[in-house]
Image (cartoon, rainbow, N blue to C red):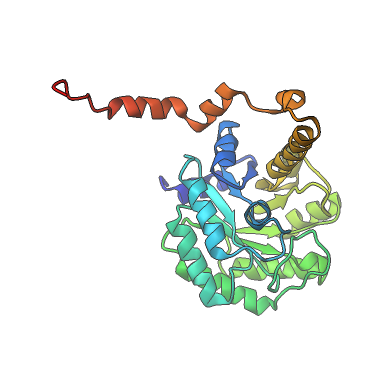
Amino acid sequence: MSSSSGRFKKSIDNEGILVAPGAYDAASAKLVERAGAEVVYVSGSSVSTSVHGYPDVGLTTLTEMVDRARQVAGVVDVPVFADADTGYGNPINVRRTVEEFERAGVAGIHLEDQDFPKKCGHFDDKSVVATDEMVAKLRAAVDARTDNDFVLIARTDARAVEGFDSAVERSEAYLDAGADVIFFEAPESVAELEEVAERIDAPLLANMTEGGRTPMQTAAELESLGYDIALFPATGFKAVLKTLQDVYVEIVETGTQQGVLDELVSWEGRNDITGLDEIAELEGRYAVEPDEAS
């Protein structure tokens, strides 16, 4: 399993829980990798807000997500998996979605059973498609992948719409259709998190989004419950928004950045993150000596 998708699948299968922080661009992905994460997640919510400034309500296109995923996969060595929303259409669209993400160098995606336009899984007033429709999408995704290790994560949002038992039944149907991992969105208590793990015999992803319906648990706590992936999708992006908000207000109100210097990465730190020394080394390697005769 030398491919990125193979390494991702192996990490899921290994003992212990896989901690998956969310990134939204190449720079944030570099920082996720530097922190020691074994995988980078491309957050649909964070990408949507950074691309068009609106909430996560289905406005982001396949092209926008794949472009970001390609940029992320191009700067890190660890596997990358991404939010693919509802697959951007019917099963035929899902086929193209899988093809495009595979070509972008992504190791896996998650597809959800919401109706279009989808919403953040912790927003109100969601709706889900029929189970058979989602099953058809997953079958199309399985057929479309050229790498059998490309990880297909099936997300169900049925807990908030049809109830807990229906979400479990859907999860079982999605596994039968070929899903590798189940993403049971928005359990509403620790007891529900535990029941998901007890009733669904498959690798499981838990979404730890701040302020959502699911109570916060540590990765160790989730592992003890039986989960395989702890997802922290937008924590980093929220930190960036808070810092930007504070810094811009300070500059506008005071006319200087002096009061927020401790919130900024240093000049040297920025150059280190962006690899300036590597660029300088390459410039030296390819430098052309001036013509002495001139």
Lateral position of residue 275 relative to residue 285, left or right: right
Lateral position of residue 140 relative to residue 166, left or right: left
Q: Residue 262: horizontal and vertical position, in percent?
A: 72, 23
- The C terminus: image quadrant: top left
Q: Residue 95: horizontal and vertical position, in percent?
A: 49, 71
Q: Is residue 119 above or below residue 47?
A: below
Residue placed furthest toward the front: 294
Q: Residue 155: horizontal and vertical position, in percent?
A: 67, 62
Q: Nearer the viewer, residue 35 or 24?
A: 24
Q: Residue at x 47, y 62 (%)?
A: 100
Lateral position of residue 221 relative to residue 60, left or right: right
Q: Is residue 61 above or below residue 249?
A: below
How many tags in the picture? 0
Quarter-of-image position of residue 51: bottom right
Q: Residue 112: horizontal and vertical position, in percent?
A: 66, 65
Q: Is residue 51 above or below residue 257?
A: below
Residue 148 visible at all: no
Residue 22 visible at all: yes
Quarter-of-image position of residue 132: bottom right
Q: Residue at x 49, y 59 (%)?
A: 101
Quarter-of-image position of residue 283: top left
Q: Residue at x 45, y 55 (%)?
A: 104
Q: Residue at x 74, y 60 (%)?
A: 120
Q: Nearer the viewer, residue 249 or 265?
A: 249
Q: Nearer the viewer, residue 269 or 102?
A: 269
